[in-house]
Image (cartoon, helix red, strand yellow):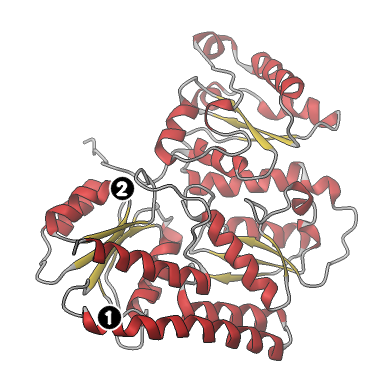
Amino acid sequence: MSTLIEQPRYSCALGATQSVIAIKRAMPILHSGPGCGTKINSIIGQVKGYGGANSMPCTNTSEAEVVFGGEEKLKGVIEGAFKVIDADLFVVLTGCTSDIVGDDIGSVTGVFQAQDEPVVFAETGGFKSNNYVSHDKVVIAIIDQYVDKFANDKTTLKGLVNVFVTPPYQDPYWDGNLEEIKRLLEGIGLTANVLFGSASSGLEEWKTIPRAEFNIVVSAWSGLAVAEHLERKYGTPFFHFPYLPIGGAETTKFLNGVSEFANLEPARTAAFIQKEEKRFYAHFERLAEFLLEFKYGIPRRFYTLLDASYALGIARYLLNELGIIPAKQYIVDNTPEEYQEAIKAQFARISDFRSAEVAFSVDGGAIQEEIRRDDHKNRALILGSSWESKLAQDIGADLLVLSVPITYRLVLTCGYAGYNGGLRLAEDIYDRVLETYR
């Protein structure tokens, strides 16, 4: 019996193009059908980096390549890309057709690698996984086929850390989040390789990955495969914080955890946290009067339709610092089963007094129907995607769009991580609430 999945919130494995585009001066080369890249871009949206959208080279595989193989065509496209595209790294990504046919992509790229050309490959046939899984796969491919060439000097750089968060563009606020996490880590005395986006120095930063003192994973599960690979490959330990730290309490917890793991100077960490908390809670004091005045006209409970990292971070912040009660929480990132119990355990103890019911589902339509059938005596807040606009209207809820697809908002520097992100999230939530009183 076939099952129809409505409104999935992730793409196929080829969506890892977003990960390449987020690296400064890196260019994906697609060995796929002509429509694959366009469809990926339309699902995720706002992917217009150095080589994004319709500017990506592609072999445009057709029936001829299915019958005779596409290795020669790929070779020609790579040679052409070297001639006309000014990039520092090229990453060949495969689509379904080439993976089904069995093209030997490694042998094609291997010829260029032997000539010291900056090209790597990853098999990302859409049927193999989703873009969360293939993000890790592409990062590992770049490390093994490109970064490792620069690992002759294995001297550890004191205080250097590699940071792995959610996949770029799949998280619409990835760039702002990385900027804030880098700022926080530098505040307690570390040097952070964030690897992607405007806060990164690009491939020069990637080349120092093997020399990091340790790695930091800020995610429920995405990025763990990379950290585990680096631990095996270079012996680099890693610190895992299983959700996005948002607001005062969780950001402080994150920084204290990193500081203890790295054996940093406690006085410096404490001084930085004290300074940041003082500023954060000064703004919260101004918020308190508003919350008291509008206590009967603001959301009393919330639903999330987010990936695991965001759902956990959001739930802890909204409950413990804004006082909004969690309704059912929906995780929509197709979380692998081996991570689900740990995530459920986190929701079971999101505060000392409350737990939250959580469901793992990739069917946006089914989730929306379940929320519609819920009791709506109190005003609700929905944290999801643009697809929840009609749902919010139907049940009289407020909506903040935090996940793809995000079609009604332009995102540049906005991020919700850290102290600054917590303030921004409070502003954005209550801005939408007040908008309804016009």
In the displayed structure, 111 sits above or below 126; it is above
Q: Is residue 123 left or right of residue 172?
A: right
Amino acid at dot 1: Leu
Q: Position of residue 117 (x, y in %)?
A: 81, 31
- Considering only order in the chain, which callout, 2 or 1, is on the residue closer to the N terminus? 1
Left or right of 145: which side holds 185? left
* Horizontal arrangement in the rendering, residue 146 relative to residue 69 (left or right): right
Please, is residue 63 above or below residue 309 in the view?
above
Give the image quarter of residue 99: top right
- Residue closer to the observer: 425 or 101: 425
Q: Residues within 10 Å of mark 2 (few under 14, many from 20)?
A: some
The spot of residue 303 in percent (x, y) is 26, 64
Q: Is residue 328 visible?
A: no
Residue at the spot 75% in from the left edge and 47% down from the top edge: 203
Q: Specify the quadrant of the image occupied by residue 265.
A: bottom right
The percent position of residue 2, horizontal first and vertical second, equals 23, 35
Residue 386: numbered disc: 2
> Which residue shows up at 75% across the image and 24% down it?
82
What residue appears at the point 60 percent right and 40 percent down from the top-left corner? 21
Residue in the picture at 31% in, 48% down? 386
